[in-house]
Image (spheres, helix red, strand yellow):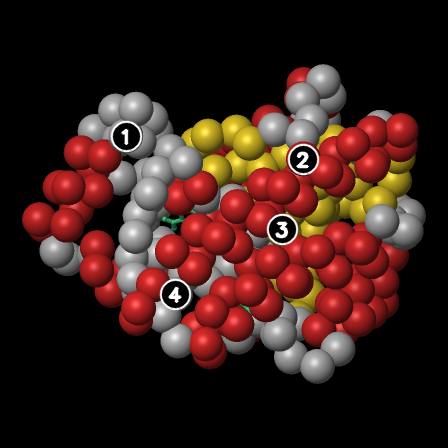
Amino acid sequence: MGALTGRTALVTGGSRGIGRAIAERLAADGATVAVHYGRSAAAADEVVEGIRAKGGTAFTVHAELGAEGDVATLWESFDRQVLEHATSTGLDILVNNAGVTPRGEIDETTAEAFEEAVTVNMRAPFFLTQQALKRLRDGGRIVNVSSGATRIALTDIIAYAMTKGAIDAFSLTLAKALGPRGITVNSVAPGIIDTDINASWLRGNEAAERSAAELSALGRVGRPEDVADVVAFLASDDARWVTGQVLDATGGSQL
Ligand code: NDP
């Protein structure tokens, strides 16, 4: 029996990067995992196949966040499939992970890039969670993936940092609202993690990798699993007395 056996989880943006590692870790802990994706259907299928190959249970849920009816599409797909994979309807763990990182100083940020960040990073978690509440069982968990950029001023991702600051306020406030139901709500704030989001400036650029590694007290760039393990803790019974918090998972960046 794993720590999450009998629980059902939904991970947004589970097709790639940090979300993929979270989906794999929650499944390894015994949860039935709904792996949400937007554009990367093949990658999401691969995540599900990998989980099943290890004896876990998972299925994909498609919804392009920001498209018309995105929230309804996601939950309809979840509701339609969940009973094929779990013993009951409903949800125990919601991980709002999907995100985009528009790059640019304040004078370089276009209205389109700003809108996309707000839509995917802020609006989608808010309304996905709103519709999750009737599915989420008492004692459940909500984990919102935030960013170390809310603590460390990185001027070239200013719009992104704003959206993640909003997520932290969401976690704090929702934790109070859902406390009476025994549901905890927390943010996890990763530092620089080697995923596609950073590929354009990080991968294959030795100087960039070195300076990214030097940001962390632990002297390396983070891996998706470094974040997934923290999310798994917050999703577990061990974290039952932790709510409304931002858990820094930046490897001690800029301490
Ligand atoms: P990736 O780019 O590797 O993956 C992003 C994921 O989000 C994909 O699964 C993608 O799905 C999904 N996604 C993005 N936009 C949409 C959309 N419009 N509709 C549906 N799904 C969408 O990013 P990371 O894994 O690096 O980031 C995951 C989270 O971690 C984000 O919230 C990010 O802000 C946060 N974070 C990342 C850090 C890092 O250094 N990597 C640092 C701090 C925070 P698909 O491909 O299927 O469309």
Q: Which residue is mark 4?
A: 102
**Closer to us: 9 or 147:** 147
Task: Classify mark 3: helix, strand or loop.
Answer: strand
Q: Quadrant of the N terminus?
A: top right
Mark 3 / mark 2, whichever is N-terminal: 3
Mark 3 / mark 4, whichever is N-terminal: 3
Depth check, mark 3 against mark 4: the one in front is 4
On screen, 255 above or below 74?
Answer: above
Q: Amino acid at mark 2?
A: Leu
Mark 1 / mark 2, whichever is N-terminal: 2
Task: Classify mark 2: helix, strand or loop.
Answer: helix
* Horizontal side, residue 79 vs residue 245: left or right: right
Report if residue 70 is visible in the image: yes
| Numbered tag placed on residue 172 in the rendering | 2
Q: Which residue is rendered at x = 58% and y = 41% of the image?
A: 168
Query: Dot 3 surroundings within 10 Å: few (below 14), some, or many (20 or more)?
Result: many
Q: Which residue is mark 3?
A: 96
> Tags 4 and 2 in contact by the CB under 8 Å rule?
no
Residue 73: x and y in percent read: 76, 73
Report if residue 13 is visible in the image: no
Residue 145: x and y in percent read: 54, 45
Residue 18: x and y in percent read: 46, 49
Q: Residue furthest bottom?
A: 68
